[in-house]
């Protein structure tokens, strides 16, 4: 089938839009920490069942210590730091602006790849990063009666959004290293389904580590009581189930699959369309007004992401 990678990438963007929408609702209801625990625990169970059905093992078989190490690091950076920042940013600036800051993820991945893997960071990449940052700046800054600029959004929400973009980008590079380690240790005579399910097995490792990390943090904050209450709340569990399905269980796994079928640049650009897609529910369901300045900033940010990969 032609363009399967592109179709998967668009599916990821839609999946992450659904995740952002319901993560905002869940985080406002029970807090971001509890929401993350619920979704990662549910994701682990879902992925275990999926692996059991497809490869006859309900766990990441063949994964060695190096695989666990790199994927655990990616979970710490991408889930525990990045997603904690992202879910909290929804509370302060809403899912639309929270996803806008996620356009920082590709440039951050490029910087991380340059530092960690020695990948080239050309002047074209630097230009694309500058365009992305310009778009974000236009969306969140306004000018007062003088010549001074001020934030249209709360500073805490902006910092959380930046942290989310950084965590997502760096976590992606770490997960790429982990998947490469995993691929090396799969025996040549292993069933072909093993390699096909590699993204899902890798996501399961990240979900296990991320869920354990959030649970530890929650216990240190003496928030286990809130978790118990949330489990008994049908609305919260409905939100958590939707976030799990469209987030770590399907969305993240499909994002890793997309780069196997399409050039990374095209895949990442299409996946970065989430802040565009999320405008629809914001306008038609939340009845929020989108200003021309925000639309221009959003368009410039997406252009920056496209330039970053397609130059």
Image: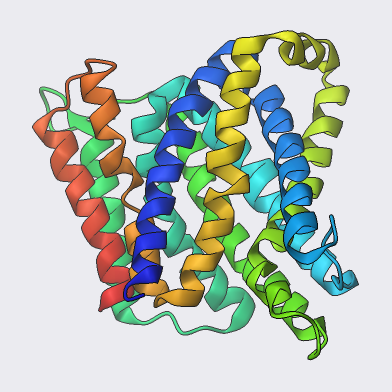
Up the image or down, 215 lies above or below 230; here it is below
Which of 294 and 286 lies nearest the eye of the viewer? 286
Can residue 246 be seen here?
Answer: yes
Residue at 67% in and 59% down: 200
Name the colour scheme.
rainbow
Q: Residue furthest right?
A: 65
Quarter of the picture holding the C terminus: bottom left
The percent coordinates of residue 177 (x first, y second) are 68, 74
Looking at the rendering, which quadrant does residue 181 occupy? bottom right
Up the image or down, 48 lies above or below 108; here it is above
Seen in the image, is 123 located left or right of residue 31?
A: left
The percent coordinates of residue 35 (x first, y second) are 65, 26
Residue at 47% in and 67% down: 258
Quarter of the picture holding the N terminus: bottom left
Which of 275 and 221 lies nearest the eye of the viewer? 275
Residue at 26% in and 61% down: 304
The percent coordinates of residue 91 (x first, y second) are 49, 21
Seen in the image, is 286 located left or right of residue 35?
A: left
Number of marks in picture = 0
Can residue 151 be seen here?
Answer: no
The percent coordinates of residue 163 (x first, y second) are 54, 44
Which of 135 and 43 lies nearest the eye of the viewer? 43
Seen in the image, is 231 located left or right of residue 82?
A: right
Up the image or down, 218 lies above or below 211; here it is above
Which of 75 and 296 lies nearest the eye of the viewer? 75
Q: Residue furthest bottom?
A: 188
């Amino acid at each position: 089938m032609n363009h399967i990678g592109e179709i998967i990438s668009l599916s990821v963007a839609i999946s992450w839009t659904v995740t952002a929408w319901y993560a905002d609702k869940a985080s406002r209801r029970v807090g971001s920490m509890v929401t993350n625990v619920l979704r990662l625990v549910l994701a682990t169970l879902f992925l275990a069942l999926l692996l059991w059905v497809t490869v006859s093992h309900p766990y990441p078989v063949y994964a060695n210590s190096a695989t666990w190490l790199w994927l655990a690091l990616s979970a710490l950076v991408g889930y525990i730091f990045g997603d904690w920042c992202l879910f909290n940013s929804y509370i302060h600036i809403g899912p639309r602006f929270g996803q806008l800051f996620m356009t920082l993820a590709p440039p951050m991945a490029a910087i991380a790849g340059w530092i960690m893997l020695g990948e080239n960071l050309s002047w074209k990449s630097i230009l694309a990063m500058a365009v992305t940052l310009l778009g974000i700046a236009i969306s969140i800054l306004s000018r007062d009666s003088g010549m001074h600029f001020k934030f249209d959004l709360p500073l805490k929400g902006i910092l959380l959004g930046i942290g989310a973009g950084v965590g997502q980008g760096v976590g992606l590079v770490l997960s790429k290293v982990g998947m490469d380690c995993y691929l090396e240790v799969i025996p040549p005579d292993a069933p072909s389904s093993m390699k096909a399910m590699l993204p899902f097995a890798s996501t399961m490792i990240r979900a296990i580590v991320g869920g354990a990390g959030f649970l530890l943090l929650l216990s240190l904050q003496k928030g286990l009581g809130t978790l118990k209450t949330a489990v008994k709340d049908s609305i919260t569990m409905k939100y958590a189930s939707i976030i799990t399905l469209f987030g770590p269980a399907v969305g993240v796994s499909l994002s890793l699959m997309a780069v196997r079928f399409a050039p990374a640049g095209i895949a990442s650009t299409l996946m970065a369309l989430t802040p565009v897609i999320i405008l629809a529910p914001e306008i038609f369901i939340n009845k929020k007004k989108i200003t021309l300045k925000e639309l221009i900033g959003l368009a410039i940010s997406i252009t920056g992401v496209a330039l970053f990969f397609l130059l």
